Structure formats: structure tokens, C-alpha cells
Image: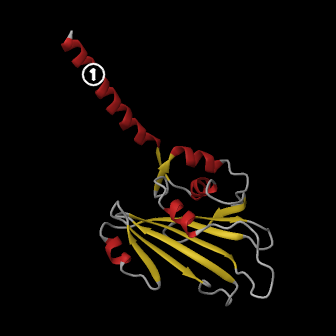
Amino acid sequence: MGLRVLVAALALVLLASCGSDNDSSDEATSTPRSLAALVEGYLPATPTAAHDAQLPGKTAAEIEFGPADSPDVLTVSVEQIEPGAADTLRKICVGCDVTELDDGSTMHVTRGDRLPGVGLGETKYVRVSIFREREIVELTYEGRAIRVNGPEDERPRLSVEALIRIAQDSNLGWTTVQGFVERGDDLSYWTG
């Protein structure tokens, strides 16, 4: 009887390992829509619009939320890189905080008053970049600056901590799970 229990246990282990191999079939290449679908759950407000950010060499989505006349914008992008390229890219960090993560990747967090090409004082931004062995995940959050002599803007905002949580989501990368691809195909606020 002990031998039967051992054989049954081994059969269960083999079946379980076959099941985990099948889980990889749930993996899909990320799309701009799947990036928006993944990020949607982290946003402090319902997105009002989203579209393909069309960044060269990257899969990217630009998601707007907040007032239509001056929305906050979150751009999410993923990019494949050659093995070893991350080591070089990690060293290029001007004015950012660098953190080595447990999985061996490096995170850069950059805060600034404005992005290049934007009028002085018109935009605040935070960029979180994670350099993994074969990919870069990047989030850039832009929000209207709080006026010094006017009422504070009461709209909900993404915190730096929330951006870091999004960037570290295991489903955010060059590949994701098929469920986010399917959800991305059904986004009502996708504008193209």
C-alpha cells in the first residue's frame, strides 16, 4: 500500500508540473491597450482617454485621467534590450534616485518641475524606470503644477509610491498575461 501512495504522489507532482508549463501559454506580448488595462486598476480616477503613445522601439500607452481641460497623463512603456545593455543604461542617471531591487534590476526615480519642451512651471513630472536584464519598464507621470497664488488643486493624484508599485507589477513588461490583452481590447475610453 505504501508503494501505491508513493506512485500516486509522484503522479500528482508530474501533473502539477505539467499544469505550470501550461501557465506559460497564458503569456502574451504586451500591447499599448494591455498596458492601459493593467495600469487602470492603480489610477486614482477613471481614465478619460488612452491611446498608443507611438514611441520608437517601444510598446507604450498614454493614459489621461482627471478634468478634461487639464488631465493628468501617465505614459507607460516597455522596451526590449540586448542582454548586458541594462548595465550601461543603469549608469546614465542625472538627478535621479537609484535603487537596486531584490531581483537584480535597477530602479531610477526622477522628479522634476517640467519635461523638456514644456513651458516653465506648466508641468510637474515623475519618471520611474526599471532596468531589467532584457527590458526597460518606464512610467512618466505628468500633472498640472499647483499655483503658488491660487487655490490648491484637489484632484486625486498618483504618488511616487504608487508609480513604483505599478512599475514593479510582475505583469508589466514586454510580455504579460493574456487576460490583460483581452481586457485591453475592451477599453471604452481607448481613443486610438
Res 18 quadrant in image: top left
In the rendered image, residue 38, in percent from the top left (x then y), is placed at 58, 54
In the rendered image, residue 133, in percent from the top left (x then y), is placed at 34, 64
In the structure shown, which secondary structural element does the residue marked by tag 1 occupy? helix
Q: Nearer the viewer, residue 36 or 53?
A: 36
Residue 54 can be seen in this image: no
Q: Which residue is identified by label 1? A: 9
Quadrant in which the C terminus is drawn: bottom right
Residue 178 can be seen in this image: yes
In the rendered image, residue 144, in percent from the top left (x then y), is placed at 71, 78
Quadrant in which the N terminus is drawn: top left
Query: Is residue 157 toward the left or the right of residue 179 in the image?
Result: right
Q: Residue at x 61, y 85 (%)?
A: 113
Q: Residue at x 56, y 69 (%)?
A: 160
Q: Residue at x 79, y 68 (%)?
A: 68
| View extreme (top): residue | 1
Q: Nearer the viewer, residue 59 or 133?
A: 133
**Label 1 CA crowd tier, 10 Å (few <14, some 14–19, many 20+):** few
**Residue 122, relative to residue 32: is it above or below?**
below
Q: Nearer the viewer, residue 53 or 111?
A: 111
Q: How many marks?
A: 1
| View extreme (left): residue | 3
Query: Is residue 55 toward the left or the right of residue 85 in the image?
Result: right
Residue type at the position of mark 1: Ala
**Residue 177, relative to residue 88: is it above or below?**
above
**Residue 167, relative to residue 126: is it above or below?**
above
In the rendered image, residue 171, in percent from the top left (x then y), is placed at 48, 52
